[in-house]
Image (cartoon, helix red, strand yellow):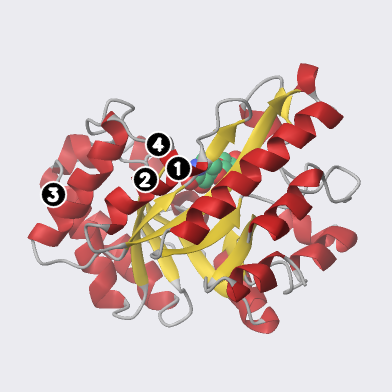
Amino acid sequence: AGLHAAAKASGKLYFGTAFDDPELSDLPFAALLNNTSDFGQITPGNAMKFDATHPTPTQYTLSRASSAVSLAAANGQLLRCHTLVWHSQLPGWITNPPTPWTNDTLTPVLQEHIHTLASAFKGRCAAWDVVNEALNEDGTWRDTVWYRTIGEAYVPLAFEVAAKADPSVKLYYNDYNIESEGAKAEGVRRIVKLVKDRGIPIHGVGLQAHLVSGSAPSTADLARVMVSYTALGVDAAITELDVRIKDADAGATAETRQATEYANVIKACKTVARCVGVTVWGISDRHSWVPGTFKGEGHALPWDKDLKKKPAYKAMIDAW
Ligand code: XIL
């Protein structure tokens, strides 16, 4: 039995992974992705983002996103849909408008974008990451086109539009560096309350968990901060787990430590009643966003470049 089977046996909804379209032509890799004993849930890593789905003001390009929906359906995997409102991977018409955005011009754009995507995949997404990475490290609002133009009201507005378009999907706030207590975790709780206090649905907090080996959270710290979110009446999910290692440290010793760090995340989810599942941000070091984004780091996923299982795999099975 694999990772998803083990998660289910512990009463969770899923263990899953992100994937990106080009990876599907790597057939041995695709076979791992399609193995539902390990992966009962998938997340399209890029296909549903604003730049991929809405390249010009009047044009929606949903074919890549639809393929992800079809793949999940064909495999019988749950789908986490990612993401409706973010500051990154925006098309030029949003970041460089011919005339500067105002509250009156940007609000309908935000509403239409969310309505169109959430309606298009209505009933197909188990969860939507409605708002992604709205916070700075100190818990204040990140300076984005959405915040600058609309103010914090863009957050409850986004959840409201998504809820109307797909009343049964679970709506998440998703962010990184919120895996232990601190100012940013406090900001997350502020966001949950901001939405709830307006009577608008929010169902979960997604903890991305892009972790750094050697400074990954303990089981207790991670469980404690998850409970601080779920105590507000929402679910929690680990949505983008990877544990990166410095190239200079790569090797058996580093992989042993990494295995413990992966297992600690599983143990934390297992202990928190409203932690619904864990998603890794990719399967194998052959296809990982880490080396391209963090110079001199990598080796972050449970399978190595040769698609062989690293110690993290068995450690996670045992932890479930
Ligand atoms: C990453 C993708 O994996 C890359 O392929 C892309 O080039 C950049 O974005 N937080 C998120 C994800 O919410 O959408 C990001 O995904 C990783 C960080």
Q: Is 171 in front, or is 49?
A: 171
Looking at the image, is mark 2 or mark 4 earlier in the sequence?
4
* Residue 237: assigned label: none
State how many labels appear.
4
> Given the image, on which type of amino acid does mark 2 rest?
Arg
Q: Disc 2 versus disc 4: distance between alpha carbons? A: 8 Å
Mark 1 vs 4: CB contact within 8 A: no
Q: What secondary structure is found at the residue carrying circle 2? A: helix
Q: Position of residue 76 (x, y in %)?
A: 64, 82
Q: What secondary structure is found at the residue carrying circle 1? A: helix
Mark 3 vs 1: CB contact within 8 A: no
Which is closer to the viewer, label 2 or label 4?
Answer: 2
Where does ligand 1 appear, by image quarter? Answer: top right
> Given the image, on which type of amino acid does mark 1 rest?
Ala
Query: Where, quadrant-wise, is the C terminus in this rendering?
Result: bottom right
Q: Disc 3 versus disc 4: distance between alpha carbons? A: 26 Å
Q: Position of residue 54 (x, y in %)?
A: 44, 57
Residue 182 falls left or right of residue 102: right
Find disc 4 in the rendering and name its residue.
180
Find disc 2 in the rendering and name its residue.
224
Q: Residue at x 48, y 49 (%)?
A: 51
Q: Residue at x 44, y 52 (%)?
A: 50
